[in-house]
Every structure is written in C-alpha cells, then in structure tokens.
Image: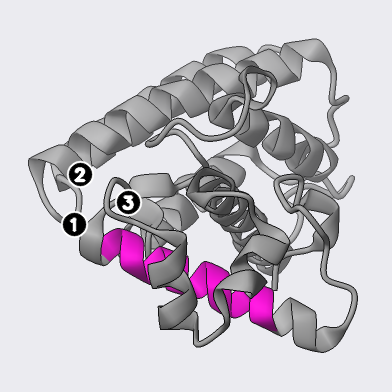
Amino acid sequence: MMPVSHATSLRRAPVQRRSAERLTRILDACADLLDEVGYDDLSTRAVAQRAGVPIGSVYRFFGNKRQMADALAQRNLERFTERVTDRLRAAGPRDPAGAGDWRTAMDAVLDEYLVMKRTAPGFSLVDFGNQIPVGSRHSEPNHRVADRLTDLLSGYLHREPDDDLRRTFLIAVETADTLVHLAFRMAPEGDARIIEEARELLRAYLGRVLDSS
C-alpha cells in the first residue's frame, strides 16, 4: 500500500482503511492496463471498471490519467526502496564499524531494479516516471531515485549524504537507466551481456569515486 507521505499527485489522501484499499485497487488496475493497452489508450473509466469501483472514486484521488500514472511511479519507487532495504538488512554490515560495502549496495540496487523491470505490472512503461511525461521539472525521476538512494545508502555506507555523494549516485542512476533500457530494447528479459557491461561500468566508476574518498 502506497505511503500517504509520498502520494504527492493525489487530490485527496486516503484516511480510512477502506479508502486506502480502494486506492490500491485503482493503482493495480492502472498498472495492469498499462501493460495491456499502453499509456495512450489508458482511460480513467477503464481503470474504474477494472478496479471494480465507481468512476467517481478514481476522480476522488486523481484529476486525470497523468496524475494516476505519476502516483503509480511513486508507488514503484516506494516498493523498490523497500526491496533494497530488505536486501541490505539481510546482507548486514561488512566491517567491524558496522558500515556496509558499496559493492553489495550496488548489486542490491541493480538486481532489485531488474526484478521489478521483469515482473512488476506497468513498470516497463512507468517505472519511476521516466517513460511517459509525468511529474514536474522539479521532480525528474532519476533525480528522485538518486535522492532516495542517497538517503538510504549513506547510512548503510556510513557516509555523509552530501552533495558529492548525491552527485555520484545521480551519475550512477543515469548510467544504469540508459544501459538497462538498452538491454530491454534488445531482449524481452534484458540482454544479459549489456546488463553485465552496465554492472562492470558501475563498479569501475563507483570504485574510483568511493574507494578514494
């Protein structure tokens, strides 16, 4: 269920459990229909029918399908963050001081993104918002992801979440985003060789920056 604190595109945040469950059904239906018909043919009426809710329930939360897709992208980011967090918690710290290793963190981020790319409904079109024009210029998806990773990984790595770390993660996110999308254009499940090249490139870049700082 999407945390209300990040539901910036909602007209009205759900207060009661029933309302939150209805919002979840609406976003699930939106995701399924994106895979079936694409964004251009997506409609709020079709989403309402698939979710089994009155059309007024959709408009209670969203003014149009653009806002709905942006909310789905935000939910994807929340779920992605949870997956990475769970994986890093299971991996545990790598040194006596309790700090994690950036290689473990990088693999967790890339692997969990690939899992969602392959399995999450609607993710191939929306992911975190960069496949269709949703959101605003002040919340560009890769900046949003880099900011979230900085907040998450700075504690795991025992590093200050300063501008240098934020810039490093933004460059890594932009690089991974470009190469992963190339891999999925080349093969439905992602070209394994391109993904491995992306992993090696990220290791080389992050190793040069993070191991020297």
Q: How many marks?
A: 3
Tell me, yes or no, whether the highlighted magenta stretch contains residue 31.
Answer: yes
Quickly name the residue at label 3: 124
Image quadrant assignment for residue 199: top left
Q: Position of residue 32 (x, y in %)?
A: 36, 70
Mark 3 is surrounded, within 10 Å at the Cα level, by few (under 14), some (14 to 19) or many (20 or more) other residues, namely: some
Residue 189 marker: 1
Asked which secondary structure carries label 1, the reply is loop
Image quadrant assignment for residue 88: bottom right
Amino acid, disc 1 = Glu
**Mark 1 against mark 3, which lies toward the viewer?**
3
Image quadrant assignment for residue 193: top left
The front one of 107 and 5 is 5
Can you see residue 200? no
Residue drawn at x 76%, y 54% is 93
Asked which secondary structure carries label 3, the reply is helix
First in residue order: circle 2 vs circle 1: 2
**Mark 2 against mark 3, which lies toward the viewer?**
3
Query: Which region of the structure is painted magenta?
Result: 22-35
Q: Position of residue 210 (x, y in %)?
A: 65, 20
Amino acid, disc 3 = Ser
First in residue order: circle 1 vs circle 3: 3
The front one of 50 and 36 is 50
Q: Kindly indicate whether the residue at mark 1 contacts the one at mark 2 (C-beta within 8 angstroms).
A: yes
Tell me, yes or no, whether the highlighted magenta stretch contains residue 4.
Answer: no
